[in-house]
Image: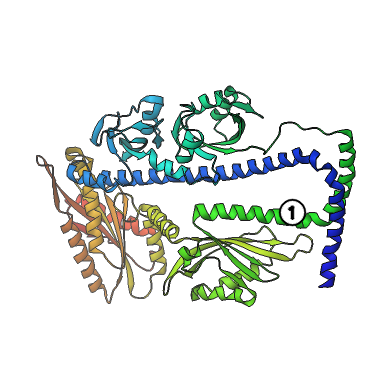
C-alpha cells in the first residue's frame, strides 16, 4: 500500500508544483481551452448526427420494405377482386396513411387518391425503366389536411413493371423521431431539401428555428456565417455535394454549431443544430510575458505528461467509449458488457430487464463473474472455452458468436455477441473485454428466409432449377440399399393456349396449381421443383422390396399426376383444357449424376409427347 501511494505521490507533487506555476497563465490560455472544448463538442455532434441519420434512413428503408410487401400481396391477389384488394390495403393503414396504385403511365388504378405528379424530375422514368424505389420530392397535404411524404415502388410482373404503388407516411411520425434527438434545451434536428425548404422538425425545432423563416436559407440570410463556410452560396454548394459537412453561425447574438448529413433517400438533408456559446473564439493573442511563462510551463508540463499522459489518455478514452456505448445501445436496443481482468469485474450497460428479465445495473465481482454462464444454454457452453482462447489473441481481433441465453424462467432466445479485448500496450496484458449483445431472433429468422428465397422458385414456392439439381445430385450420391431414386419429368400440354387465349394471369395460375398438386402427391421423401416454364420435376426416394412393387408405385404416381393435371381454365367466355405428359427414369447403381437421369426422363417424356400426350412413359434402355 505504501509503495502504491508513493508511486502516485510522485505524480501529485510534480503536478502540484506545475499547477502553482501555471496559475499566472490561466487567463491567457482560456481561449485555447475553449477552442479544444469546441472541437470536442463538434466531434460529438458529428458522431451523433451520423448515427441518427443512419437511424432515420433505416426508418425510411423499413417503410419501403413494408410497401414492397404490400405490393407483392396485391399482385398475388390479381386485379379481379376489388373487395379483397381493399382489405389488404386496410391491413397497412396503421403504417401508411394513404395507399394508391397507378399504372406505368402514372394514371390512377385503385386505392386512395394521392395528388402527386410523378413526371416531375424524371421520377416516373426511374420507377418504370430503372425499377428504383423513389421518394416524391417534398411533402404533400392530403385531403384530410395531413402533411405527408410519399414513397413509391414499382409493381413488377413477369419481368416488367405493370404499375406503381404509392404510400404516404405522415410527417408527424418523422417529427416524433426528430424529438428523440438531443439533450439540451436549445438543440434540434430537422429535415430539409437541397433548396432549404423544411420537411420535418418537431417540438424542439419549433422552439429553436420554427417561425423565424420559411426556409433554412432565409434563416441563414439573417445570420452571420463563420469558419470554413462564410456565405449562403458556399452552403448551397456543400449541400449539392451530397456529403456531410459542418457550419457555424450566430443568430441574434447566439452562437450555433450545425452538422448537415445527406439522407440516402430523395434530396433530403438532416440538419443538427446545437447552441455553441463560449465553445470557441475566432482569435486570441498572448503578451510577451505570457509567452515566456507559457514556454516555462510547457517544459514542466512535458515532464508531467511523460508520467501521467497514459493514465489521462485512458480516462478520456473510457469516458468517450461510455458515451458511444450509450448512443449505440439506445439506438440499437442492445446491451454493452465490460469485463475488467484485474480486479475481475463484469458490468452491463443498457436495459437488461427488457432483454433478459434481469434487473438493470448488474455488477459482478471476483468469482461471481463466472455465474453468467448459468444463463447460457447447455448446448452453447463451448463459448466459454472460445472466449478464453480469444483472450490470448492479438489486440484488434474481433470475437463473434451466436448463442442462446435465458430470457425467462424456462425460455431461451438467440443473441449475437461481438467484442474485442483491450490490452496494456506496454506489457501486452489484458485490461478489459468489451462486447455488444443484441437480440438476434428476428435476424436469424430473416437469414433463414433469405436462404429459402434463394432456393425456391419465386412464383410457385417449390425448388428452383439450380437447387433441384443440387438436391437430386445429393440424393443420387447418398442413396443406399433397396432405396431407389425415381425421377419424374412433368410437362404441361396445351399450356401455350392458356397464355395466348386467357392471358398470363391464368398461365401463372396453371403453373401454381401444378406445383401445388405435385407437392400434395409427394408430401414425404421427395423433392419437387420447377425446371423452367411449364416443366416440373419430382425426385422421389422409394424403398423397393422388389421391382414389381417399385413399378406399381411408379404407375400409381404417374397416373395420379396425369389425373390432377387434367384441368380446364376459363375466363367466362373462353375455356382452355390442359393435361400433362410425364417421362420417368429410375436411377440404378450406374446412374449417379443428375444429367444422366435427366436425359433418361427427357427421352421418356419425348415418347409421351409423341404418343398423344396426356400419358406417361418409363425410360427403357
Q: In this view, does 248 lie above or below 66?
A: above
Q: In this view, does 181 lie above or below 234?
A: below
Query: Residue beneath label 1, please?
Result: 313
Residue 8, by quadrant, is: bottom right
Which residue is drawn at the image coordinates 84% and 57% (left, top)? Answer: 307
In the displayed structure, does residue 121 sit left or right of residue 559? Answer: right
**Residue 147 at x, y percent in the picture:** 35, 35
**Depth order, front residue of 330/611:** 330
**Residue 236 at x, y percent in the picture:** 55, 25
Count of labels in the image: 1
Residue 203, by quadrant, is: top left
Which residue is drawn at the image coordinates 54% and 43% (left, top)? Answer: 185
Q: Can residue 593 be seen in this view?
A: no
**Residue 16 at x, y percent in the picture:** 85, 55
Q: How is the image coloured?
A: rainbow
Q: In this view, does 125 lie above or below 374?
A: above
The N terminus appears in which quarter of the rendering?
bottom right
The C terminus appears in which quarter of the rendering?
bottom left
Q: Residue furthest left?
A: 573
Q: How crowded is mark 1: few (under 14 residues within 10 Å), some or many (20 or more)?
A: few
In the displayed structure, does residue 315 sit left or right of residue 121? Answer: right
**Depth order, front residue of 240/338:** 338
**Depth order, front residue of 415/614:** 415
Q: Can residue 222 be seen in this view?
A: yes
**Depth order, front residue of 270/438:** 270
Identify the element where label 1 is drawn. helix
Which residue is drawn at the image coordinates 29% and 45% (left, top)? Answer: 93
Amino acid at each position: 500500500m505504501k509503495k502504491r501511494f508513493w508511486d502516485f505521490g510522485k505524480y501529485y507533487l510534480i503536478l502540484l508544483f506545475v499547477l502553482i506555476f501555471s496559475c499566472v497563465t490561466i487567463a491567457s490560455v482560456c481561449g485555447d481551452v475553449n477552442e479544444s472544448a469546441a472541437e470536442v463538442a463538434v466531434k460529438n455532434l458529428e458522431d451523433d448526427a451520423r448515427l441518427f441519420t443512419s437511424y432515420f434512413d433505416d426508418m425510411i428503408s423499413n417503410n419501403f420494405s413494408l410497401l414492397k410487401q404490400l405490393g407483392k400481396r396485391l399482385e398475388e391477389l390479381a386485379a379481379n377482386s376489388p373487395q379483397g384488394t381493399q382489405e389488404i390495403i386496410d391491413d397497412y393503414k396503421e403504417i401508411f396513411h394513404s395507399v394508391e396504385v397507378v399504372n406505368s403511365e402514372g394514371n390512377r388504378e385503385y386505392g386512395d387518391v394521392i395528388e402527386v405528379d410523378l413526371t416531375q424530375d424524371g421520377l416516373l422514368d426511374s420507377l418504370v425503366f430503372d425499377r428504383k424505389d423513389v421518394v416524391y420530392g417534398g411533402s404533400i397535404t392530403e385531403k384530410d389536411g395531413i402533411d405527408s411524404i410519399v414513397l413509391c415502388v414499382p409493381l413488377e410482373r413477369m419481368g416488367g413493371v405493370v404499375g406503381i404503388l404509392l404510400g404516404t407516411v405522415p410527417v408527424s411520425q418523422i417529427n416524433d423521431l426528430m424529438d428523440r434527438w438531443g439533450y439540451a434545451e436549445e438543440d434540434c434536428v430537422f429535415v430539409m431539401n437541397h433548396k432549404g425548404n423544411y420537411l420535418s422538425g418537431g417540438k424542439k425545432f419549433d422552439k429553436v428555428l420554427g417561425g423565424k423563416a420559411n426556409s433554412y436559407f432565409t434563416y441563414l440570410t439573417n445570420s452571420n456565417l463563420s469558419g470554413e463556410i462564410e456565405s449562403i452560396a458556399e452552403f448551397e454548394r456543400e449541400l449539392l455535394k451530397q456529403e456531410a459537412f459542418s457550419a457555424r453561425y450566430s443568430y441574434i447574438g447566439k452562437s450555433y454549431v450545425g452538422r448537415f448529413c445527406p439522407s440516402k433517400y430523395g434530396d433530403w438533408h438532416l440538419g443538427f443544430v446545437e447552441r455553441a456559446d463560449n465553445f470557441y473564439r475566432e482569435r486570441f493573442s498572448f503578451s510577451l510575458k505570457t509567452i515566456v511563462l507559457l514556454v516555462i510551463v510547457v517544459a514542466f508540463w512535458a515532464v508531467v505528461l511523460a508520467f501521467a499522459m497514459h493514465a489521462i489518455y485512458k480516462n478520456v478514452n473510457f469516458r468517450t467509449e461510455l458515451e458511444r456505448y450509450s448512443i449505440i445501445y439506445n439506438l440499437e436496443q442492445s446491451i454493452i458488457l465490460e469485463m475488467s481482468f484485474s480486479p475481475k469485474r463484469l458490468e452491463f450497460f443498457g436495459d437488461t430487464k427488457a432483454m433478459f428479465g434481469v434487473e438493470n445495473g448488474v455488477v459482478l465481482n471476483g468469482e461471481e463473474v463466472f455465474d453468467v454462464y448459468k444463463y447460457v444454454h447447455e448446448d452453447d457452453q463451448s463459448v466459454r472455452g472460445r472466449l478464453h482462447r480469444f483472450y490470448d489473441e492479438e489486440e484488434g481481433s474481433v470475437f463473434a458468436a451466436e448463442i442462446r441465453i435465458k430470457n425467462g424462467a424456462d425460455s431461451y432466445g438467440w443473441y449475437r455477441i461481438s467484442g474485442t479485448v483491450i490490452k496494456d500496450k506496454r506489457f501486452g496484458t489484458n485490461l478489459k473485454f468489451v462486447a455488444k449483445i443484441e437480440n438476434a431472433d428476428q435476424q436469424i429468422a430473416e437469414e433463414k428466409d433469405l436462404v429459402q428465397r434463394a432456393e425456391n422458385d419465386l412464383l410457385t414456392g417449390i425448388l428452383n432449377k439450380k437447387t433441384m439439381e443440387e438436391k437430386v445430385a445429393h440424393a443420387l450420391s447418398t442413396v443406399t440399399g433397396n432405396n431407389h431414386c425415381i425421377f419424374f419429368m412433368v410437362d404441361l400440354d396445351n399450356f401455350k393456349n392458356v397464355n395466348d387465349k386467357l392471358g398470363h394471369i391464368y398461365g401463372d395460375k396453371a403453373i401454381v396449381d401444378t406445383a401445388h398438386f405435385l407437392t400434395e402427391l409427394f408430401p414425404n421423401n421427395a423433392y419437387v421443383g420447377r425446371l423452367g416454364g411449364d416443366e416440373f420435376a419430382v425426385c422421389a426416394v422409394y424403398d423397393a422390396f422388389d421391382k414389381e412393387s417399385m413399378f406399381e408405385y411408379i404407375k400409381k404416381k404417374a397416373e395420379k399426376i396425369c389425373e390432377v393435371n387434367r384441368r380446364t381454365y376459363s375466363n367466362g367466355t373462353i375455356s382452355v383444357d390442359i393435361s400433362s405428359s410425364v417421362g420417368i427414369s429410375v436411377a440404378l447403381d450406374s446412374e449417379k449424376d443428375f444429367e444422366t437421369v435427366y436425359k433418361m426422363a427427357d427421352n421418356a417424356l419425348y415418347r409421351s409427347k409423341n404418343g398423344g400426350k396426356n400419358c406417361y412413359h418409363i425410360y427403357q434402355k
